[in-house]
Image (cartoon, rainbow, N blue to C red):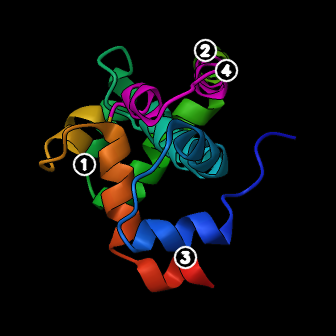
């Protein structure tokens, strides 16, 4: 079952600028983790199906001819029909989900998602601070 969603009182206090304890950050991570996994899986699938692999010359050559959207669909279908590639992708996705399931901090989650450099480039000192700042930008949304 996992951690229950963060309490409205905690989120209201967050919007008012109160300090956040380690337990509250853990509660927040528990509430956010399913969304992070969903977002990350979509990104992993997109990367896995994107026909830019040097080994997949057929898919690559299909992109060089004709209508780009139609060619992209053809190249992706070629990858979907390639059983060894799909087996490898499914194993990669399973390993990725297992890694995400074990995270106990936003920093770890963002690192596995390969967005940690972007998170830390926003002028925040830590991944936790990034999350807090993001939530504080939308205080009314979290109070209801």
Q: Earlier in the sequence, mark 1 or mark 4?
A: 1
Crowding at dot 1, Cα within 10 Å, few <14 / some 14-19 / many 20+, comes out as few
Residue at the right extreme of this rendering: 1
Q: Which mark is residue 90?
A: none
Asked whether disc 2 touches disc 4, contact meaning CB atoms under 8 Å apart, the reply is no
Image x and y of residue 11, in percent: 55, 67
Q: Which residue is mark 3?
A: 142
Judged from the image, the secondary structure of the residue bearing numbered disc 3 is helix
Q: Residue at x 49, y 30 (%)?
A: 105
> Between marks 4 and 3, how big is the CA–CA gap?
29 Å
Nearest to the eye among marks 1 and 4: give it: 4
Where on the picture, by quarter, is residue 55? top left
The answer to which of 37 and 6 lies nearer the viewer is 6
- 54, above or below 52, in the image: above
Magenta residues, dominant SS class: helix
> Between marks 2 and 1, how big is the CA–CA gap?
28 Å
- Magenta range is 92-114
Q: Which residue is mark 4?
A: 98
Q: Which mark is residue 65?
A: 1
> Between marks 2 and 4, how big is the CA–CA gap?
15 Å
Residue 84 visible to an observer of this rendering: yes
Q: Which residue is mark 2?
A: 88
Left or right of 96 on screen, residue 137: left
Where on the picture, by quarter, is residue 139? bottom left
């Amino acid at each position: 079952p996992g951690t229950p969603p963060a309490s409205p009182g905690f989120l209201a206090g967050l919007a008012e600028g109160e300090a956040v304890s380690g337990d509250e950050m853990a509660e927040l991570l528990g509430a956010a983790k399913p969304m992070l996994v969903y977002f990350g899986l979509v990104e992993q699938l997109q990367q896995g199906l994107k026909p830019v692999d040097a080994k997949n010359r057929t898919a690559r050559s299909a992109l060089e001819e004709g209508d780009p959207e139609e060619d992209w669909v053809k190249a992706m279908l070629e990858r979907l029909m390639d059983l060894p590639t799909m087996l490898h992708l499914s194993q990669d996705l399973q390993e990725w989900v297992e890694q995400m399931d074990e995270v106990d901090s936003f920093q770890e989650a963002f690192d596995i998602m390969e967005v940690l450099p972007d998170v830390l480039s926003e002028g925040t000192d830590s991944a936790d601070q990034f999350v807090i700042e993001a939530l504080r930008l939308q205080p009314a949304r979290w109070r209801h």
